[in-house]
Structures are given as structure tokens and as C-alpha cells.
Image (cartoon, grey):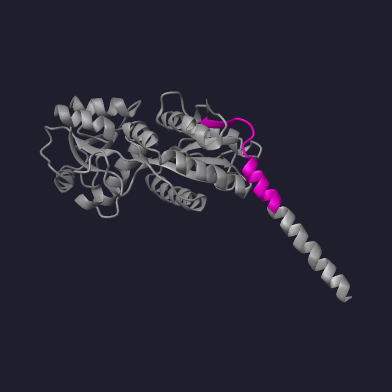
Amino acid sequence: MRNQGRSAWLFAAILASGLASATEARAQGYPVKPVRLFVGFTAGSAPDGVARVLSPALLESLGQAVIVENRGGAGGSIATATVAKAPADGYTLLMMAAADTLQPALRAKQPYDLERDLTAVALVVVGMAVLSVHPSLPVRNVKDLIALARAHPGRLNYGSSGVGSSSHLMGELFNQMAGVKIAHVPYKGSADSALANASGHIEISYPSVVAMRTYAQSGKLRPLAVTSATRSLLMPELPTIGEAGLPGYDRATFFGVVAPGGVPRDVVARLNAAINAAVSTPETRALLLKQGLEPRSGTPEQFAAFIHEQIVQNGKLIRSIGLKVE
């Protein structure tokens, strides 16, 4: 009996050692062929721009080509569904956008569960917008704007890049937290919204930091504050909305890489290390900052927790304003 127990122990030890060796070999061997990186939006969009900056940088880190494929439509859901159903081998990835975390609350029926059917790999960048006003508006800061909006409920308008967009929710969160009623005017895109603001058709908009720098230099728009919890690296002189009068306000966009659910942890770790290394290079950082996006790094677990937090926050906000796409 004693010999049988010892034999069982040795067998278990050998088996564990073999599994560990197989895992290590798989991590070292991956990838052995090109990797596809899906983008749920058209060429030239913000997530597409991030993917195309990241792709050549990952070639050096992974030793294999990362091919960007655009599958636009349904707020990014078409590409997300494609990746969620793909083999869990690490060769099919998605450039997740902040818009993906809106879909569970916006659409009653989805062919996937964002957290169950996808595996978080790495957060790549975050991007903030700038709360901006037309120069004719007699406000110099966030507190002035809140006071004016409270004095004239429903008289002011803010533009967004469309119903259910990030800028739409930025405006609605501002309304809720400030206790004001600034009317929403949707446009076809953020560029159209900012142009309408600069032309005086609407009083307020939420352009990107890059766009805002151009408008501010020409004097066509007055920046008040950035929408994120931290100041912008590109416009550090601007306070956050939280600093300027609404403590706790935080709305930002983000892009990060996810894989199908069930991808082996060693493959996820390999991808995470490669992405973190890629976005840390001076060349990649410069290209991303040029787009107004700030590079980030971290673990898969941190990105998964971030995704969950975004889904919960977006769900609460969307339900509170009664917004539905279908």
C-alpha cells in the first residue's frame, strides 16, 4: 500500500511537471502564424488608427504579422461577435472600443456576452474630450456654465457625434451631476458637432483634445475642462471637469485588445507583454499622442476589471436617461 501511494504521488508530480512544460513550450512557440486584429469600425476611425499604429509595433514583439481587418457596423458589434465566436487560440483578436461597453445596455439582444465570451488582454490607450463653448457664451469656467444653465433651463444646447455616442453620454452625465438641463443635438460625427459649435449653431460641444487645440488656437472655441479624471498630457493647463466644479465626473474613451473567451492564460500573458512593450516605445507613444490618445499598460486582470466597471457605469447612465437603440 505504501508503494502504491508513493507511485501515485510520483505519477501526479510527473503529470504536473509535464503540464507545466507543455504550457511553457506553448507560450514560447506562440505565435507561429499571422494574427488577425479585428476593428469594429471603418478605416480612418479612431480604433482603426490605434490598431494600425499597434500592428507594426507588435510585429517586432511577436515575430509575426498582425493583420488589421475592418468589420464595421452595429456600433462595433459585428466585429465583436466575430471574435467572440472565433477559436480560442490567440490568433483572432479585437480592438475593443469604449462603444462596446455601451452595447449591453443599448441593445436588448446581443449574440455574445462581453465578459463571458471575450478575454481581456491589454488596455492600450485612453482618450478624453474637452468641454468647450462658443466664445460668445459669457462663461469662463465650469462653474460659470453651470450657473448659466441653471438660470436658463433648456435654453442651451450641446452637440454630440450621435445618439448613444460617448459625447452624448458626456453631456447627459454633466446634466445629471450639475442638475441642469442642456438640450442634446446629435450630429453625424464629432467633427460636425465641433464645427457647429465653432459656427455658433450650438453653444457647447465635446471635441477631442487634438481638434480642440486647433479651435482654441484660432479662437473659435473656448476650452473649459477635460472630461477624464486626469488632466491631458497634450493640454495640461486645462483642469478636469471634476477639478473645475463637478467632483467625481469622469468620462473618457478607451481602446484595448481582447481575445475570444477561453484563450490559454500563457498566450494571453504573451500578448499582454508584447502589447505593453509596443506601446512603451517612444515611436509608438508619439504616434498615439498625435491622435490625442494616451498610452496605457497593465495586466489582463486590471483590464478585465476596467471593462466590468465601464459596463456597470454605462448601464446605470443609459437606463437613467431611458436610451435604447432597439
Residue 184 in magenta?
Answer: no
- Is residue 32 in the magenta section? yes
Quadrant for the N terminus in the image: bottom right
Using the image as rendered, state which of residue 182 and residue 125 is in the foreground.
125
**Total marks placed:** 0
Residue at the right extreme, as displayed = 1
User: In the picture provided, is 231 more to the left or to the right than 75?
Assistant: left
Does any portion of residue 308 appear in the rendered image? yes
Residue 265 is left or right of residue 228, and the answer is: right
Judged left or right of residue 304, residue 250 is: left
Q: Position of residue 261 (x, y in %)?
A: 61, 44
The front one of 172 and 73 is 73
The answer to which of 221 and 33 lies nearer the viewer is: 33
Q: Residue at x 32, y 29 (%)?
A: 190
Above-or-below relation of 149 to 64: below
Whether residue 108 is visible here, answered yes or no, is no
Q: Position of residue 137 (x, y in %)?
A: 13, 35
Q: With respect to residue 191, does 12 lie above or below?
A: below
In this rendering, position of residue 133 left or right of residue 283:
left
Residue 156 pos. (x, y %): 20, 37
Instruction: Give, as a single range, the part of the protein colored magenta.
Output: 21-39
Determine which quarter of the picture holds residue 132.
top left
Rendered view: 21 above or below 168: below
Instruction: Residue at 35%, 43% (x, y): give it.
Output: 252
Residue 299 drawn at (x, y percent): 49, 51
